[in-house]
Amino acid sequence: MQKVLYVGLDVHKVSISVTVAEDGREGATSFIGAVPNTPAALSKLSKRLGKDGHRLEFCYEAGFCGYGIYRQLTGLGHGCTVAATSLIPRKPGERIKTDRRDSQKLAILHRSGDLTRVWVPDEGHEAMRDLTRARMDASMHLMRARQQLLAFLLRHGRTYDTGKHWTQRHRSWLAGQTFDQPAHQIVFQDYLEAVWTTQERRDQLVGRISTMVADWTMGPLVEALRGLRGLDLISAATFVAAIGDLARFESARHLMAYLGLVPSEQSSGERIRRGGI
């Protein structure tokens, strides 16, 4: 029978700490050490651990390093689990945290089946997710740029009271603002150009999302969600890019629980206490 090795990876930007747990409840656990966080080093590690014909089951926490390690290891024919960080069991009172201990904990929990794996998108889906996130970042930067401009104008007694902000009439009003102090005029122009530049960036990203949704594998789902009130193309694409295939949820309740749209509860005995969403 083929022996299984459970490999816990504590992934960092520069290095990866590695612990191997042998199959079985009483299987030995050994810390291999730290290897560079590079594809070449990871490939060399997998060859070293699997040289005796062992089946390798890797695991690491979902984080800033993305899914490159997962794709490389599965491409080499090994098993790999990307664990949900917030659902990893933690002992109360545990006060020592090191890379070695983290990798050891991952290997042991993976062996016992106590890790919750996250859904790993394909490269096309991940690319669309990054595109929608870039649009959200641009929207946040635009909101911040507008706030800075309006705050500057307010400090100098310039308020627009004849309609809504950022309309064509408001743009004409902004274009007519002048200041006696050259420094104030420089600051005003800088804030104003930041608003127009950021708005153009956001609009370009919106246009690219609209164009690429048509060729996206999730495009039909996006179009279906647009039938719901309050969802347009961009909001539907952002939702699908963040959530993924809705069919992976067994029911609507599982989806709501994933989104956090269920009330919390702390009940014991005759006491029932339910919290907010």
Image (cartoon, rainbow, N blue to C red):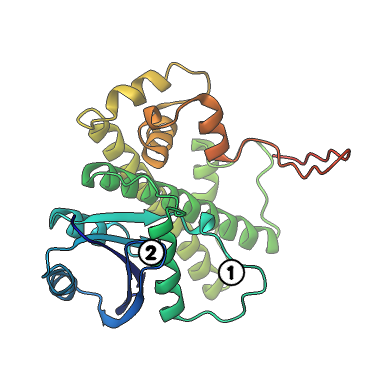
In the rendered image, residue 179, in percent from the top left (x then y), is placed at: 57, 65
Front position among marks 2 and 1: 2
Nearer-N-terminus badge (2/1): 2
Residue 62 appears in the figure: no
Q: Give the position of the C terminus as an image quadrant.
A: top right
**Mark 2 near mark 1, Cβ–Cβ under 8 Å?**
no
Q: Mark 2 points at which residue?
A: 64
Residue 71 quadrant: bottom left
Q: Reply above or below: 226 against 78.
A: above
Amino acid type, residue under disc 2 in the picture = Phe
The N terminus, quarter of image? bottom left
Circle 1 sits in a helix, a strand or a loop, which is it?
Answer: loop
Q: Nearer the viewer, residue 66 or 9?
A: 9
Which residue ends up furthest to the top in the rendered image?
A: 227
Q: Which residue is drawn at 20% across and 74% down?
A: 38
* x then y, percent, for residue 9: 33, 69
Q: Quadrant of residue 64?
A: bottom left
